Image (cartoon, grey):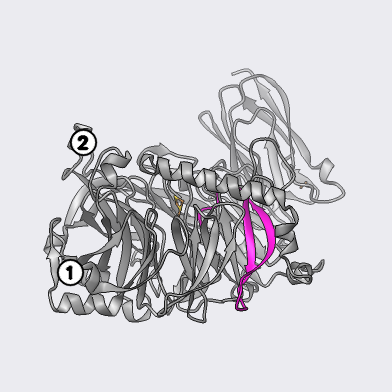
Amino acid sequence: MKITMKNLLKLIIATLVVLVAFTSCNNSNSSTSGALSSNVAERVYVPPGQHDSHYAFISGGYSGNVTVYGLPSGRMFKEIPVFSQFPTSGYGYSEETKPLLNTSYGFIPWDDAHHPDISQTNGEIDGRYIFVNGNNTPRIAKIDLLTFETTEIIEIPNSAGNHSSSYVTDNTEYVVAGTRFAVPVPQKDMAIKDYKGNFKGTLSFIKVDSEDGGMEIKFQILMPGFDYDKAHPGRGKSHGWFFFTTYNTEEASTLLEVNASQNDKDFVAAVNWKMIEEYVNNGGGKMMPTNYAHNVYDESTHTATSTMKKEVRVIDPSEVPGALYFLPMPKSPHGCDVDPTGEYIVGSGKLSANVTVHSFTKMLDAIKNEKFSGDAYGIPILNFEDVLAGAVEQPGLGPLHTEFDDRGNAYTTFFISSEVVKWKLGTWEVLDRQPTFYSVGHLTIAGGNSRKPDGKYMFAMNKITKDRYLPTGPELEHSAQLYDISGDKMELLLDFPTHGEPHYAAAMRADIIKERSKKIYKLEENNHAYVAKTDDDVKVVRNGNEVHISMTTIRSHFSPDNIEGIRVGDKVYFHVTNLEQDFDVPHGFAIIGQNTSELLIMPGQTKTSVWEPKQVGVWPFYCTDFCSALHQEMQGYVRVSAA
Ligand code: CUK
Ligand code: CUA
C-alpha cells in the first residue's frame, strides 16, 4: 500500500473507518472469536513432529529480507537474508557474501523488499527459485530453494523505486522490474518542475537463465514518466504479454491531490514482450551507457563475486509498433492481476468505487480493428468500453490486490473497508466478504497468481495490528490472518505475526520442494580459495600486513587454536571451514572487538571474517553456536604484538 499525499484525505477517512471498526470490535469482543467455528483449532494445529502442508514466503518490507512460514500453523521457520546484513548467519558481513550487496551506489546493506514470486514452469509453481525486488535501490534477488539462500542479485539501472517487480513469466523466461518514481534517464541535474515529458519510467525484462549463466537485463523499455505500480504476466492464452498498472499519468512532480488525480483514468500498460524479444534478437534497440552491479554466489567456491556492467539495451516503444498499448483503468490503479485462464485483467483503482476487469480477447480485437482513442504518449490508447469485460460494482472501499482460486473465483483486498471480498469471474457477483484486522494490503493464495492455484488457504497481510496480540509497546509486528477458502464462505482460522512489513507473499504446497531442499554441502566439492579440508591444510600465511589463516572447526575444537605472530595494523582473515558432515551441525566464529558480525558456518562450508587488531594483547575467539556438550570448550587465542 502506498501512502502518497494525494491519498491523504482518503487515508484520514480510512483511519476513521478503521477506528470505527476497532471500536465496534472492542465493544463486542466476542464477535471475532465468536464467529470462529468450533473445530478451527484442529484445522490449524500441526502436532509436534509433524509438518505443515504449505510453505509461505513472506516479504519483509523494510527488514529487507524474506521469512519462511508453514501453513496452516503460521510457524516461522527461517528468515532468509536477502538485501539486509544478517548477523545470525553472517550474511553481508562475511567476505564471501559481502559482494552480493554491492551496487553502483556502493555497498548497500539494506533494501525494501516487496514482492516475492516463485519460479514457474508452464504457468505452474515449480519451486526452484524465489525472486524478490528491492524497492529502494532498484534490485532483484534470486533465492535458490535448494539451499534457501540468496544466490544472485542484479541491480536495475535507469530506475528508481523498483515496485512493479518481481513477477515471472509462465516458464520463468523473464522476471520484470518497473519504475515507481520516474526520473531523468540518463540521470542529470535539472529543474524538478520540468518533470513532464523529461522524466522517464522504465520497464525491464530480465532474462533468468541467460547464456552466460544467471540473470541478464535483456532490454529496458523507455516509458512515459508515470509511476508503474504493479505487474502481472499473461497466462495461458495471454502468455507473451505483460501488464503493468500506472498512476500519475498527469506526470506531476508532486502528488498532492490537485496535481495527480485529475485524470479520471490512468492506464494498464500491455506489453507484448515476445514481440520485443524478437526485435532484440534481431539486433533491435540501442546500448545505453550506465552502471549496474550483477552479483553471483558460486556454490562451489562458497563465494560471491560482483561485476559492474557498463551498458544496457534500451528500446523506445515507437521502434516496435504493435508491442505496447494503454488500457484505460479508473482512478489510480494499484493492483494488476491476471486470472489463471489469462483472459481477465483485474485492475483496482484505489480511488474507484468498482473493481474493473478488462478482457484480453477484447483487447486483441480492438487492436486488430485499430480502435484507438489516441496515442498522446506515442503509445496507442484503447477505448475503455472496447476492452471492458465487466466490473464488480461497489464491492468495498479502497481495492488493492486480487488473487484467484481454482474454481473461478477472485479475492480482492480492500484497504479502507478492511476486508477481503470474494467474487465470481464472468458474472462479477459478490459471493462473500470477511473482515480483516485491520486494513489489509496484499493477500496470498498458494499459486494464486499462477495458472494452477491451490484453493485451500488464503492469508491476508494487514497493515495495522492494534489489539491482536499481547502489547509490545508502540511497535507491533504486523498481522497476517489465515482463512480456509475451500468452502462457499471464507472462514477465518488463525492470526499470526509477521516480521517487518510484509507486502506480499508467495506460497506453495510443501511437497513440491520438501525432499530436494534437505541440502548438504559436500566438503570434497568445496573449492573455496582458502579451504582447509583436513588439519594438514591448516596454515597461517602472511602477505605484507595481510594475514590469511586457513582454519578448521569440528566438535569440539578450532585448529589452530593458539595463533601468534599477529601485529597491530595487520588485517587478519579467518577462513574457517566446518568439517562436520552431519548436514545440520553449524559452528560459529567470533573474536573480541570484531567490527563485523559472527560467522555461522554450515558443514562443508568455508566462511571468512576480517579482524583488524588495534591493541597489543592476547585476545580470545570462540564458537557462537551451541553445537555439543563441549561447545563451551570451542575457543582459542590470538596473540597481538606491537607493530
Ligand atoms: S504493495 Cu508495495 S506499496 Cu500493495 Cu505490493 Cu504496499
Ligand atoms: Cu562449535 Cu559451539
Query: What residue type is disc 2 on?
Result: Lys
Q: Which residue is at the far right? A: 629
Decide: is 147 above or below 467. below
Residue 277 at x, y = what percent?
24, 69
Tell me what residue is drawn at x 51 percent, y 53 percent.
Answer: 503
| Disc 2 and disc 1 in contact, CB within 8 angstroms | no
Residue 492 at x, y = what percent?
66, 65
Decide if ligand 1 comes within 8 Å of the CB at mark 1. no
Among the two numbered marks 2 and 1 on one chain, the one whose residue lies closer to the N terminus:
2
Q: Can residue 529 be seen in this snapshot? A: yes
Q: Nearer the viewer, residue 370 or 32?
A: 32
Is 485 in the magenta? yes
Residue 427 at x, y = what percent?
42, 79
Q: Can residue 148 be seen in this snapshot? A: no
Q: Relative to residue 411, is residue 227 drawn left or right?
A: left
According to the picture, the residue beneath numbered tag 1 turns out to be: 279
- Crowding at dot 2, Cα within 10 Å, few <14 / some 14-19 / many 20+, comes out as few
- Residue 436 occupies quadrant: bottom right
User: Which range is magenta?
Assistant: 477-504
Tell me what residue is drawn at x 79 percent, y 42 percent.
Answer: 634
User: SS at mark 1?
Assistant: helix
Residue 379 at x, y = what percent?
16, 61
- Crowding at dot 1, Cα within 10 Å, few <14 / some 14-19 / many 20+, comes out as some
According to the picture, the residue beneath numbered tag 2 turns out to be: 188
**Quarter of the figure that contains the C terminus:** top right
Q: Nearer the viewer, residue 633 or 414?
A: 414
Q: Relative to residue 226, is residue 390 drawn left or right?
A: right
Tell me what residue is drawn at x 20 percent, y 34 percent.
Answer: 193
Q: Nearer the viewer, residue 562 or 632?
A: 632
Q: Which mark is residue 7?
A: none
Q: Nearer the viewer, residue 515 or 337?
A: 337
